[in-house]
Amino acid sequence: MKRKLPPFPAIRAFEAAARLGSFKEAAGELCVTASAISHQVRVLETFLGRAMFERGPRLVELTADGRLYLQQIGPVLDQLDASTRLIAGETCAGPLHLQMTEGFMKRWLMPRLKRFMERYPDLEIRMERWMPPTVFEGGRPDVIIHWGDEPVPGVDIKPLLSSTRVPLCSPEFLKANPDLSRPEALLTKTLLRDETDDGWAEWFGLIGRARDCPAGGPVFAHCELSMTAAENGLGVVLGYKDMIGKTLRDGSLVVACDLEAPTRTIYSIACKTARAHEAKIVAFRDWVFEEVMFSDASETEALQAAQ
């Protein structure tokens, strides 16, 4: 059957204007004039027999048909872009936009990032703090370090990092509370919590005391804040052991009690499914998995030797 396809310049103009919310910005991205964008959008509207934008004096907004059409053609253009880059043998160069939690950024990625930068010197790392949900908008970010491994429609999610969870505190706090090696002792200590996933009730459940888990203690917006609070001697925090090798090695936090909560997937690496084969995304993803496989083993050996 013969395909019914509008002119490709009209598709490109519409998608850019719809994604950016501006004919002017779309013109800048496509290196044409705003009037050229407007003309191509008119061509598309004539072809479809429907208005794609509501035009005002200073802005344009998508109509309901325009929003639906963008949802349909966006993934198609993403796939076309990815396939073209793959066949063309695109090199790893240009900006790589990454989003992740502050804790993953500081505790896991930063101690390793120099190795990635040395391997791919032509990639420009652009990092932003991220909190759920996992959403890709406006062509960026390229990669999100996704919390857990829950599926997201249209997103390629590969489990990355699993870990047990263990009570941690500062060396000074441990010295002042030598009884912390007994799990029951933590029932009377200051417990540091975060809003996302506290974990203490589960941990006390390991000794049959989930109902006795204290309800008090400072609550922080995310785990990096509660970890920092623990480093400053404010109490005991539950930390993911496999994410904080450098922190333990440096000694700013120590294991307060050896009882560990069961292993769980804490992070996955996510990108839009249509872009999963882009050279720069593949390069970052492969490097991260390499670090998980090899670097963590060597860090564990170094930590054990230090102890």
Image: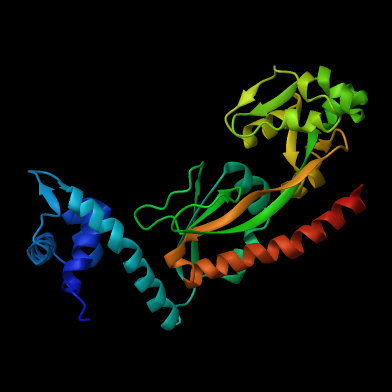
Tell me how the rendering is colored: rainbow
Image coords of residue 10 (percent x, y): 16, 68
Look at 87% across and 57% down and name the residue there: 301
Q: Residue at x 41, y 72 (%)?
A: 82
Residue 58 lies, in percent from the top left, at 11, 44
**32 on left or right of 131:** left
Closest to the observer, 64 or 241: 64
| Residue occupying the point 11% across, 47% down | 54
Q: Is residue 21 above or below residue 225?
A: below
Q: Is residue 110 at least partly visible in the picture?
A: no
Which image quadrant is residue 80 in? Answer: bottom left
Would residue 161 be found to the left or right of residue 142 on screen?
right
Residue located farthest toward the front when viewing the structure as drawn: 1
Q: Is residue 65 above or below residue 96?
A: above
Q: Quadrant of the N terminus?
A: bottom left
Picture layout, residue 77 above or below residue 300: below
How many numbered discs?
Answer: 0
